[in-house]
Amino acid sequence: MKIACVDFADTSAKGLESGELVTTVGGQFIDSMFPFVLMYNRLAGTPLTEEAVEIPVNFITCTTASQFNDYMKYVHGDVFPYTADEVKALIKKFNPDASVETLKKWGSTFSIEEVKTRHAEYFK
């Protein structure tokens, strides 16, 4: 029997290696950062938008143990997918050019490869 699941587990790599697990989807823990940015800006009196906005965020899909191991290293590891400095760039108090368009772009491009590339300096 082959299994696909939502949310990652410590045994996901083993299941993907053996073929018992064909795909696993997760990475949704990052979703909370997006409403935080919107709320922080609103409460600070510098909203990114006056309209309700939807920020679609990619789920991460792993179909191989290698992908899952990269997820654990680059997304779920010691460095959060968005550092404090990166989040500050979305706060108008720290960056007057912060925009909801940037926030939407971050959500739509979120992936293992995107985080790996953006954080290359942390993994030398």
Image (spheres, rainbow, N blue to C red):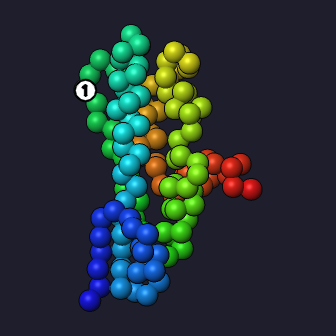
Horizontally, is 118 left or right of 36 in the view? right
| Relative vertical location of residue 23 with respect to residue 88 in this rendering, above or below | below
- Is residue 104 visible in the rendered structure shown here? no
Instruction: Kindly give the residue lying farthest to the right in the view shown.
Output: 124
The image position of residue 74, as x and y in percent, is: 57, 57
Horizontally, is 76 left or right of 28 in the view? right
Tag 1 secondary structure = loop
Q: Callout 1: 10 Å neighbours few (<14), some, many (20+)? A: few
The image position of residue 35, as x and y in percent, is: 34, 32
| Relative vertical location of residue 54 with respect to residue 97 in this rendering, above or below | below
84 or 10: which is nearer to us? Answer: 10
14 or 99: which is nearer to us? Answer: 14
Tell me the quarter of the picture where residue 69 sits: bottom right
Residue that carries the numbered disc 1 in the rendered image: 52
- For image coordinates 41% across by 19% down, the residue present is 41
**Where does the N terminus fall, quadrant-wise?**
bottom left
Instruction: Kindly give the residue lying farthest to the top in the view shown.
Output: 45
| Relative vertical location of residue 87 with respect to residue 46 in this rendering, above or below | below
- For image coordinates 41% across by 13% down, the residue present is 44
75 or 11: which is nearer to us? Answer: 11
The image position of residue 53, as x and y in percent, is: 28, 30
The image position of residue 24, as x and y in percent, is: 36, 69
Horizontally, is 93 left or right of 46 in the view? right
